[in-house]
Image (cartoon, helix red, strand yellow):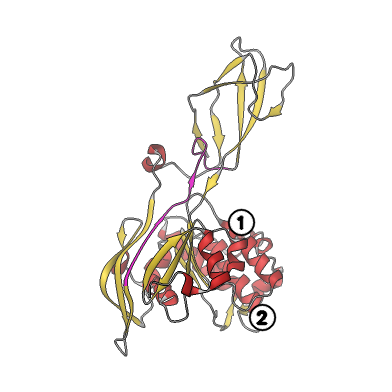
Amino acid sequence: MALFTPSFSFKISASSSPRRCRFVKSPRSFKLRAAVAVESPSFSSADRDGAPKLLLEVKDLSAVIVESKQPILKGVNLTVHEGEVLNFRLITQSILLFLWDAEGGLMYFVTIMADKEIEVHAVMGKNGSGKSTFAKVLVGHPDYEITGGSITYKGQDLLEMEPEERALAGLFMSFQSPVEIPGVSNIDFLNMAYNARRRKLGLPELGPIEFYGYVAPKLEIVNMKIDFLNRNVNEGFSGGERKRNEILQLAVLGAELAILDEIDSGLDVDALRDVAKAVNGLLTPNNSVLMITHYLRLLEFIKPTFIHIMENGRIVKTGDISIAEILEREGYKAISNT
């Protein structure tokens, strides 16, 4: 719970009883005199200064396949910021303000809607352009060797961190084809992963009963039934169930940067809508998303802030949703560098 008192004044219509309203024109002027209570993380200095906080910075990244030494990434550059909030930078969707008139008599309430601007990056490109390799390199996949460049994540050198350290630091990747883990139930897997993250954050671990209370409501986000928790991880799951299970893991772990590698592949429109709704519901002002996709249909459900086109191991073009619309109509030849 964060408490602060913004210093601004505005005009509002008078009334003899409390009312809920938006800003309106009125001859009477009031000043905010009460603190505003907001359920949110603590503000950083970057938040107060109004500048978006750098989350991930990739500079001239090059990588090869370990076994064959075949170059895949050939100078990737990408910057991702934490999501930010406009309109007084309040980290919430609605705030209740308590107002008194100059004589201290009447009380008013006003609900302000704060517009959330959350960075969602989409990477598109032909097969073999390096999209999935880029995602795997970010999370430390052992099949690839870094040959140049740098990756900074939350101010730290990501390349110096082991894969499990990256995960504990808030990096999450959803795979194209999630694997089965026979003999390990979903709830045990999630409980272990979540407690590892809590230990990293200096928080006490949750026991089985406490964790059940934490995870059960999150099943609604991904439209999964409670019995999924007792099934082995992805064992016998359909394609849609596996993708939902990946997003459930994201919901439980609360990662700061979610890398979603073709979460739309193999999904019918209803399953895609469920998965996209879940992802949208998990976006907060303190995290960001990097999606890899071939298709415009995913971007119609999860609205990207930026679209990056990858070609021959590099990001060759960055823009907005209009790029994906051009690709849908004309193909990659319309924007290719070659």
Does the image show residue 282?
A: yes
Q: Which residue, given by chain and number where applicable, does mark 2 sit on?
A: 238
Q: Position of residue 55 (x, y in %)?
A: 39, 56
Residue 147 lies in what quarter of the image? bottom left
Give 282 or 13, whichever is nearer the viewer.
13
Q: Which residues are magenta?
A: 75-92
**Element on which disc 1 rests:** helix
**Element on which disc 2 rests:** loop
Q: Position of residue 189 (x, y in %)?
A: 55, 73
Q: Which mark is residue 192?
A: none
**Left or right of residue 209: residue 316:** left
Outermost left residue = 148
Which amino acid is tagged 2? Ser
Residue 131 lies in what quarter of the image? bottom left
| Residue occupying the point 53% across, 27% down | 35
Does the image show residue 248?
A: no
Q: Which residue, given by chain and number where applicable, does mark 1 sit on?
A: 281
